[in-house]
Each structure stands twice: as C-alpha cells, then as structure tokens.
Amino acid sequence: MSQMDRPAELMIWHGERAAPPAEARLYPTLREALAAAAGCAGDPDALPWIVTEDGDILSPHWIDRHAREAGHPAGGLRAWIAQRWLC
C-alpha cells in the first residue's frame, strides 16, 4: 500500500505558539491529510505538520511542495513559510 493511502495525523499550530498544537486530527489517508493541510492556506497563523503512520514528520515545506503537485492551492502556506522562516 502506498504511503499516500495510509493513515496520517494532521497537527496545526497557530502563530508562534510552540506547544501543544491547537488542532490535531487523524485522517484515513495521507492524501486526505495533505488536502486538509492545504486548506489551511487561507489562515496566515495556521502552520500544519503531518505525522505519517510510520512516524515520519512532514514539515510545512514538504506539505507546500506536495500540495501543489497534487493540485491543492497552498499559496498562503508558502507565504507563511517565507514570512516566518526565510527572513
């Protein structure tokens, strides 16, 4: 079974807060978690991370790149990353 078809947990932090995440939700597939993470693009304070069933931690950079490849608009996420991490 492809990693994209296996369960994954989406965790969303808001703003500069370190822990705990404001939201955490388990999705039946990584594909669905990725789509939900891309949906955060409109919230400038939302910073999504995904943890796969195998324990891999997928960063906002990974999410941005793969969301765009899957056709999900993640432009707001890209702007958040650029503003916070590339300055």
Image (cartoon, rainbow, N blue to C red):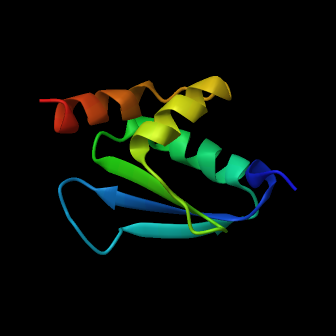
Instruction: Examine the rendered structure and indicate whether residue 30 appears above or below residue 75.
Output: below
| Residue found at x 67% / y 68% | 53
Q: Relative to the observer, which residue lies in front, 61 or 13?
A: 61
Q: How many marks?
A: 0
List x then y, in percent, for residue 20: 31, 75
| Residue found at x 22% / y 53% | 15
List x then y, in percent, for residue 66: 58, 33
Quarter of the figure that contains the N terminus = bottom right
| Residue found at x 77% / y 60% | 6
Residue at the far right: name it: 1
Instruction: Examine the rendered structure and indicate whether residue 85 appears above or below residue 23.
Output: above
Relative placement, left or right, of 63 versus 27 is left
Quarter of the figure that contains the C terminus = top left
Name the quadrant containing residue 79. top left
| Residue found at x 54% / y 26% | 73
Residue at the far bottom: name it: 20
Name the quadrant containing residue 75. top left
Instruction: Examine the rendered structure and indicate whether residue 34 appears above or below residue 8.
Output: above
List x then y, in percent, for residue 21: 35, 69
Relative placement, left or right, of 67 versus 43 is right
List x then y, in percent, for residue 42: 41, 35
Name the quadrant containing residue 61. top left
Instruction: Examine the rendered structure and indicate whether residue 87 appears above or below residue 20.
Output: above
